[in-house]
Amino acid sequence: GLPRELLESARIDGANHIQIFTKLIVPLSVPALASFSIFQFLWVWNDLIVALYIGPNDGTDLVFPIRLEKQLGTFKDQLHLLNASAVISMIVPVIVFLAMQRYFIRGLLAGSVKGG
């Protein structure tokens, strides 16, 4: 969490609860929330089990991870098509990571020791 001294110094400077939250807590929490968001997105994106249970059973409208899994049996002799599909499925997570990379790095370094 945030140090109590930081919040106390904001109160001494005359900030009310809303100002402390909007100008102090939220900006300091953005890197951690961004890191959490990236991990959560990747977890949901790669979750094949949920897609199996949520998707329809008739096979007409499958989500992308299930289509890839079903193509494994279809394209046993054409692995280049399966590999191309896997690369295409990685495009969205890579774009999300690159867009939020600076927040991710800040979140990882938030607890590190600074100075010397």
Image (cartoon, rainbow, N blue to C red):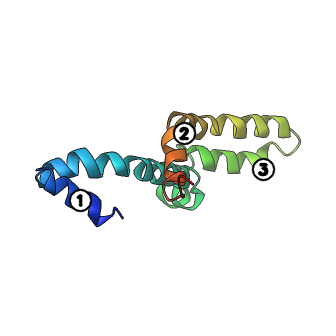
Frontmost residue, 44 versus 68:
44
Q: Earlier in the sequence, mark 1 or mark 3?
A: 1
Badge 3 amino acid: Gly
The answer to whether residue 80 is left or right of residue 15 is right
Which labelled disc corresponds to residue 87?
A: none
The answer to whether residue 66 is left or right of residue 107 is right
Q: Give residue 83's position: percent from left, percent from top.
A: 78, 39
Which labelled disc corresponds to residue 101?
A: 2
Cα separation between marks 1 and 3? 59 Å
Which residue is denoted by mark 3 in the rendering? 73
**What is the quadrant of residue 64 in the picture?**
top right
Q: Give residue 1's position: percent from left, percent from top.
A: 36, 64
Q: How many marks?
A: 3
Cα separation between marks 1 and 2? 28 Å
Residue 57 seen in render: no
Which residue is denoted by mark 1 in the rendering? 7
Badge 2 amino acid: Gln
Q: Give residue 109's position: percent from left, percent from top.
A: 54, 52
Residue located 56% across and 40% down the image: 97
Frontmost residue, 8 versus 25:
8
Question: Which part of the image, by quadrant, shows the C terminus?
Answer: bottom right
Frontmost residue, 22 versus 44:
22
Frontmost residue, 23 versus 40:
23
Q: In what element is the residue under mark 3?
A: helix
Q: Nearer the viewer, mark 1 or mark 3?
A: 1
Badge 1 amino acid: Leu
Q: Residues within 10 Å of mark 1 (few under 14, many from 20)?
A: some
**What is the quadrant of residue 78 in the picture?**
top right
